[in-house]
Image (tube, helix red, strand yellow):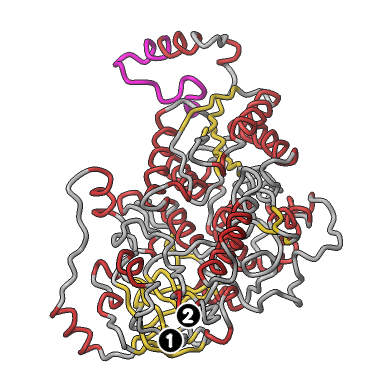
Amino acid sequence: MTKPEDPAGMRKGLTNYGDAGFSLFLRKAFIKGAGLTDHALDRPVIGITDTGSGYNPCHGNMPQLVEAVQRGIMLAGGLPVKFPTISIGESFAAPTSMYLRNLMSMDTEEMLRAQPMDAVVMIGGCDKTVPAQLMGAASAGLPAVQLITGSMLTGSHRGETVGACTDCRRYWAKFRADEIDQQEIDDVNNQLVPSIGTCSVMGTASTMACIAEALGMTVPGGASPPAVTSARMRVAEQTGAVAVQIAKSRLTIDKILTEKAFENAMRVLLAIGGSTNAIVHLTAIAGRCGFDVDLKALDRMGRETPVLLDLKPSGQHYMEHFDAAGGMATLLRELKPLLHLDALTVTGRTLGEELERASPPFKQDVVRSRDNPIYREGGIAVLQGNLAPGGAIIKQSAADPKLMEHEGRAVVFEGLQDLATRIDSDDLDVKADDILVLKNIGPKGAPGMPEAGYIPLPRKLARQGVKDMVRISDGRMSGTAFGTIVLHVTPESAIGGPLAHVKNGDRIRLSVKNREISLLVSGEELARRAQAQPVQVPTAARGYRKLFLTTVTQADQGVDFDFLASPEKKGTIPRT
């Protein structure tokens, strides 16, 4: 006896009126009100997430992308149906975009479940939108393909190429140190973001674009074309065609997001000098698929995966240069011995087969060979010690080599308000070899784990010419940032992690070589401090904040809501 086919097209997920026939009749009647014919309704239905927003310039090309995707879908014989979801713009979301990532993932998942579609094209670009969409799609289980909005172009300031947002931070540091005046900071502000699109360096947005392609979730070459180029529009049209293909073949997302795909993505993250945020996002996406992430194993992978991509903040170039150098195909060729080439992609072909089909290599200077890397190990190292029993991370490829083996005196800030009040005071007791410690900016502490881990240098030291210090927090930093900065200290201070009990004057030792971050205070003394000043875990009376504070997990579990992880456990990654 043959198994009946699952419902497809407009027959999927019928609204429950107690009469399936009437439900379909009513649905077709209303959608015909939009001018559609029965012939159109018989085609595979492809949903398109429209995440355009006036508050999100990273998605400013959304109308053109939607049009190109629709064209690709219709040319391939499908019926495109766009629908809105939440849009998160990094610099416009309070308290932080990370606070809203899980909400966007829930919005995406439930809309994919609720509305009839045989496949979905998810359009995203800004930092938290791509991970939110991949998280939601992984939970919904539909055939899905990711379309990246693309990076912005670079600008020029007094003859120097600039772009958001590594150069934003570099010039702002100059301004705080009185190295440039108000006129120049105003001038550079006009050049840092010369077009719509995501940050033009290897920040979180670009990192997640590269990771999405490494996962097999985009069409080949989907990561790197800038937002305003014709190449980006052609990628969008191809994405629409692929969406019809995966709808017909029922290539569901679980067949793409496998153990091998995640390990490929981790290799790429390490090799591009990618954003530290991507570890949190990959962990959350993997958790939706039933995988736990082993940070120690990731660190071992990093020991044998050099940084090959010469992009800021680890290198010198920008995303448009990476695209001109061949994009991900060029990078993946260099990584071939370290990749699972049999991992499936949304095209229905393997990663290895797509590399064979890619344009031939050519001479370029953006992607290095493995015997001539930018940095001999992966961009990110995982630290542990009594200050971070659950781990912490550092972007070693963007740190000062002279500070990666360092012991110093702690200068402690209890939270963001304390930091804002005292960091620029001439009375602040701080020296260049001290270690800045910022508490209460973890998942629950802020809440939402803001990108405040890039603690500004005290103004009086900046004016003396100090360019970097060791900085430690339980928060995050932008992928565009640089410096000797320890992040994601777990457990966070707001729930009573050891970081909560650090005091001014304590000695802290950082050894990236030994993967160590240690507070040189005895366990007995820490226990005494904890008993004397117990931590009050943050709470909220109502609403999304209450849901967030009640259910959010720690950084090593992806800062997802505990009830959103897959109930089926498939294992731990990476196993390499």
Q: Rounded to the nearest whole Å, what is the CA distance between mark 2 and mark 1?
A: 7 Å
Find disc 2 in the rendering and name its residue: 461
Find disc 1 in the rendering and name its residue: 431
Q: Nearer the viewer, residue 384 or 6?
A: 384
Q: Where is the C terminus found, in terms of image quarters?
A: bottom right
Q: Position of residue 25 (x, y in %)?
A: 42, 9
Q: Nearer the viewer, residue 175 or 218?
A: 175
User: Which of the 4 image quarters holds residue 144?
Assistant: top right
Q: Nearer the viewer, residue 477 or 17?
A: 477
- Within-10-Å neighbours for mark 2: few <14, some 14–19, many 20+: some
Q: Which residues are magenta?
A: 1-25
Considering only vertical position in the picture, is 474 above or below 431? above
Q: Residue at x 48, y 44 (%)?
A: 133
Q: Residue at x 43, y 37 (%)?
A: 86
**Residue 16 is covered by the magenta coloring:** yes
Q: Amino acid under label 1?
A: Lys
Question: Judging from the image, what secondary structure is the residue with disc 1 in?
Answer: loop
Q: Residue at x 37, y 88 (%)?
A: 409
Considering only vertical position in the picture, is 95 above or below 407? above
